[in-house]
Image (cartoon, rainbow, N blue to C red):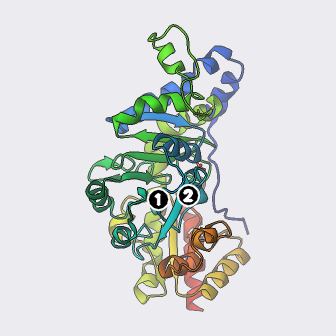
Amino acid sequence: MQQILFNNIPYSAQLAKNIAHLVSDYASIRDKVYSNYCLTLLKHKYKNSHLLLTHSATGALDMIASLIDIKQGDEIIIPSFTYVSTANAFVSRGATPVFVDIDSRTLCIDAACVEKAITLNTKAIIAVHYAGHSGNIQYLKQICEKYNLILVEDAAMSYGYYESERPLGTCGDFGVISFDITKHITSVNGGLLVINNPAYALRANHIYDVGTNRHDFLQGKVSHYEWVDQGSKYQINELCACVLYDNLINEDSLLAHMQKLTNEYTNYLQPLAQSGDIQIMDEQRLTHNYHEFYVLVKTPELRNQLIRYLSEQSIQAVSHYYPLHLSEMGKKFNMHLSLPITEQVATCIVRLPMHQELSISDVNRVAHAVLTFFNS
Ligand SMILES: *Cc1c(COP(=O)(O)O)cnc(C)c1O
């Protein structure tokens, strides 16, 4: 039986050609031709934001921590059910992460818990849009306005997702998008910093360029460039930008394919959702879903058995985050914290294969195996 992989990278003949050409074209690399092509395309989507293409979403989060001057004693409110990058950028600069539980329906930070976690030291709220979808970003925005806090959207999984006709990543002061190989639109390694508060734009350019004013120099505003701020080499590399360009010009069909897979999973697994054996995303979310297809089962034992059963059928299905508040590093900040929904979701989630190389008949095979597991 052919192995069905959890994730895969699509082959593109045009991309292979572009890369072969780019690696022998010094001037194009130096002048960041593909980065600029990508920015032109991205500007159509993020019309009113200042955009910087980074080597990763991790790098973009790191830039935000610099931009908002995180220091010892600051607190940031974040969900525990997220990737380590969300916390690390801030914690590395001395902030204390205040972990908050997630909503069982959206798997995003529970807005009702956020307000209770605010103290005089709170500097920012980091909302993670789990599986690409936002939880309650408008409400979080109101809370941030009320308490004068910075709102960061970790929209790493959200490329192509909108809410109220605005792309996710544009509601907070900042948003970050990931184009990592694990995401549905990819540059292999890459990210996007979306700056929605123009007050941060100038400094962001400096931090992005290793702490220099090179950007001003290239625009003819200064006679030479020099060291003006802290910073690092946050830029995306041109080979990755070349991959990203190929993904962006094909994004309509790439996203449409993910939606097609989602629809197929949804239809096939509906009976199990109705019988209560599994929980899937609500209908409204499933009508625009590109990043992942997950199911929640009732117990950790069932989860492990299901993953093992699928593996025996040559199907790779996987769990997701180990909660940050239970991790070795996270426990240093919150000794006895208990976040029941996070802990339950982390042990009961199964993510099913979803990628460009996956066909409808592959999805049928996976879904059929899931049905067989529950019905036998
Ligand atoms: C993937 C991901 C990241 C990290 O993105 P990179 O581009 O790999 O640095 C951060 N946060 C979340 C929620 C993610 O899913």
From the viewer's perspective, tell me whether residue 247 is left or right of residue 275. right
Q: Secondary structure at mark 1?
A: strand
212 lies above or below 349: above
* Residue sitting farthest toward the bottom: 376
Residue 186 versus residue 301 in the image, above or below:
above
How packed mark 1 is, by other alpha carbons closer than 10 Å (few <14, some 14-19, many 20 or more), is: many
Residue at (60, 47) in percent of width and height? 180
How crowded pointer 2 is (Cα within 10 Å; few <14, some 14-19, many 20+) is rated as many
Q: Are marks 2 and 1 in contact (CB under 8 Å)?
A: yes
Residue located at (58% from left, 68% from top): 333
Q: Is mark 2 within 8 Å of ligand 1?
A: no
Percent across and percent down for residue 182 are 60, 53
Residue type at numbered disc 2 = Ala
Q: Which mark is residue 76?
A: 1
Q: Which corner quadrant holds the N terminus? A: bottom right
Checking the image for residue 87, the label placed there is 2
Residue at the spot x=57%, y=75% of the render?
A: 346
**Mark 2 secondary-structure assignment:** helix
Which quarter of the image is occupied by the C terminus?
bottom right
* In this view, 303 is above or below 325: below
Q: Nearer the viewer, residue 316 or 147?
A: 147
Q: Residue at x 50, y 57 (%)?
A: 291
User: What is the number of the mark on residue 311?
Assistant: none
Q: Nearer the viewer, residue 267 or 149?
A: 149
User: From where the camera sits, is residue 350 visible?
Assistant: yes
The number of discs equals 2
Q: Position of residue 332 (x, y in %)?
A: 63, 69
Percent coordinates x, y for residue 122 in the rendering: 41, 59
The three-letter code of the residue at mark 1 reads Ile
Q: Earlier in the sequence, mark 2 or mark 1?
A: 1
